[in-house]
Image (cartoon, grey):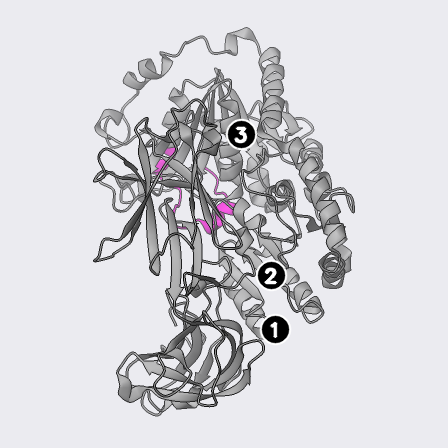
Amino acid sequence: MKIAFLINNAYGIGGTIRATANLSGAFADRHEVEVVSVHRVQDEPAITLDPRVQLTSLIDMREDSATYEGNHPLTGQPCTMFPDTGAAANSARLPYSALHDERIGDWLRTTDADVVIATRPDLNGYLARDGQPRYLRIGQEHLSLDAHNSILRGHQNQAIAGLDAFVTVSEADATQYRAELAGVSAVIQCIPNAVPTPAVHSSSLDSNVIVAAGRLVSVKRYDRLVDAFAKVADVHPDWTLRIYGRGPEKKMLREQIDRLGLYDRVFLMGPVSPIETEWAKGAIAAVSSDMESFGMTIVEAMHCGVPVIATDCPHGPAEIIDHNANGLLVDLGSGTDGYAAALHHLMEDMERRERLGAAAREKAAAFAPTAIARRYEKLFQILAGSRPRSSRRAAGTALWSRLRTALPLARTGSLEAAPNVFEVQTLPSRPVASARVAADGTVTIRFDSATLPPDRLDFLIRMRRDAKGREVRIPIPDTADAALDPSNTRVILDPETYDLAEGRWDCYISPRDTPDSRTRLTCHLAEQAPRVGQGPFLARDHITAWLPYTTSDGYLALRTWRRPAHAEVISIGVTDDRADITARLLTPSPTHLPDTTSVVAVSRNGEDHDFTLPVAGIHPASGHITFSVPYAQALARRDVDHDLWDLLLKLGHNAAPIPIGRIGGDIVDRKTTDIAPAAHLPHPAKGLTRAKPFFTVTNDLALSLRTVETGQPNTLSTDG
């Protein structure tokens, strides 16, 4: 049987995309599977599809591609399908047009699939209108009936009447649809999303980190979560909150966090894929929504052994979580106080977290992709058995090529003249590896043996943009050796063995017999959880930190810091006129902190603009120092539209400067996550000036004074 999924954009990281990737991979065990992405926005998917799944795209929206179609003549003509005002409302860069009518309709008329599954309302509309009776037409609801406005609800309900089946992800939602569409012949059934057991290690539950993840949209009510955390933050000063995702509510959340003074406790982490590595960093997972259609994030967190606190909202959480058995449900009517109370009880009770986390892993197994695929297969059997034989597909696998040549002329010429119509993407075969860092900084690299060539191989790391061409080679165990367990093909990077200079190191495999040849390693997982809350460590007489990570283009890399001494920032507090900093001095051996200890603000515009700050407090036992950065001193030295000072610690007039920053922990780039609010001050020549401390690209602390553009006094930036 051939099963095809029709999805708006298979190249992103949203819940519908993850669900499609999971289910399509499970189907591939027994069927031919194709994922058809209406849009192609980048070279490769952010979420890896099973290699047995064929990926096809209909419209190329890569602006740097020779087959880019964002300026196709048909994009200037309106789409005839009803607009999706749900999740699609936030996708203004991919508006539907007459080109979509043509491409989606042509594909639906010519596909040789036995089953076509559409994944959002407007695509359900296309499937009902342009789909063919020779295959099963199944629509999916990844939100819920209540999530749609009345106009979209009416349009989709009409479309459902033209489908064979309509699948919701919660039973409560299926019940609502059945009641509203009592006279419709389509089968309406609940089948939850498939969520695989991740390959990451389960959470240790002792990180003192609360994790939330999803689109930053109003229905997720992250404002409720932030307010609830604020109510318990003083009682639990060692806890932090991380919110992963992107969306239109980001600016509002940033303002709320700053207003509550939680900018050094609550972090907006941005989107991360795969998200499982981040769930494994959490001691608690938080879902604070007013509505959840299913709650894929709930199951993902449960798979990692993290207990979930979720609002008991329509429809998904209560169908997944058994209150106080494998998670906690908070009554929506209890508001912020109720959610704060649930946070407090779980934050203070490690034993309870462990009990709930263990039960959560057991419950999550019910959502394994193989089990969910079987439920779909049973639906296919019911639908196929109820249809008259004459409507079943009679053609064989040659149907695609036969109809392809017989297609009518498109509005701008023949389909044969458009080379990227129905573009089938062959995903490149690359060597794959995963990395995990231990608390002591040791990094273990595990290779997917099935993706490695049969040669004798070395693991190679090369320092990026390094004039010296520094590299390290480590032999990879021979995967052809029958005595070796292929799943245990690994190498270990120990900071006490390998002296890696500070910077970024790219990871490769290289044939031992041809060492000049190398291939970059695609990263499956980069696990950093053991480093949560850990400071830099001492290795080979240097203050050191190592973190494996996935690059923006999906490769494995290693970030390293190596310093004779370092001052690790513990906390940052800001007021209208200054920034107050506490840092811990780290040196290879005990170091006396003299009374002449100071902080130097080194200007990037020349030493004439430097200034020195006194250290207000020195605590020899802990190595902590405290100092303030009065904005007035920097304001008096303004020189250009954007003035920058790097902050360095000096233990004496002639002592070498010591970097101040955050290189410990598990976060590779502090620049985009650890953001302090800005103050706005007048300057006689430069005008209104925004002043703020920030972390640089090397995770070091600096000060920024930037002229505020007219009409935008509250502009925030991560570049200082």
Q: Secondary structure at mark 1?
A: loop
Count up the numbered dots. Answer: 3
Q: Secondary structure at mark 2?
A: strand
Residue where numbered disc 3 is placed = 23
Residue 120 screen position, x and y as percent: 52, 37
Lower sequence index among marks 2 and 1: 2
Note whether 354 is above or below 111 in the view shown. below
Lower sequence index among marks 3 and 1: 3
Assess disc 3: are there few (<14), some (14-19) or many (≥20) residues with their C-alpha within 10 Å of its C-alpha: many
Quadrant of residue 66 within the rendered picture: top left
Residue 201 screen position, x and y as percent: 57, 43
Lower sequence index among marks 3 and 2: 3
Which residues lie in the magenta part? Answer: 81-101
Residue where numbered disc 1 is placed = 260
Position of 89 with respect to 419 (left or right) is: right
Residue where numbered disc 2 is placed = 241
Q: CA distance from mark 3 to mark 1?
A: 42 Å
Name the one closer to the observer, 303 or 565: 565
Note whether 191 is above or below 31 in the view shown. below
The residue located at (73%, 54%) in the rendering is: 350
Which amino acid does the dot numbered 1 rest on?
A: Leu
- What secondary structure characterizes most of the magenta part? loop
Assess disc 1: are there few (<14), some (14-19) or many (≥20) residues with their C-alpha within 10 Å of its C-alpha: few
> Within the magenta stretch, is there residue 86?
yes
Q: Is residue 364 visible?
A: yes
Position of 467 with respect to 285 (left or right) is: left
Q: Is residue 707 visible?
A: no
> Within the magenta stretch, is there residue 115?
no
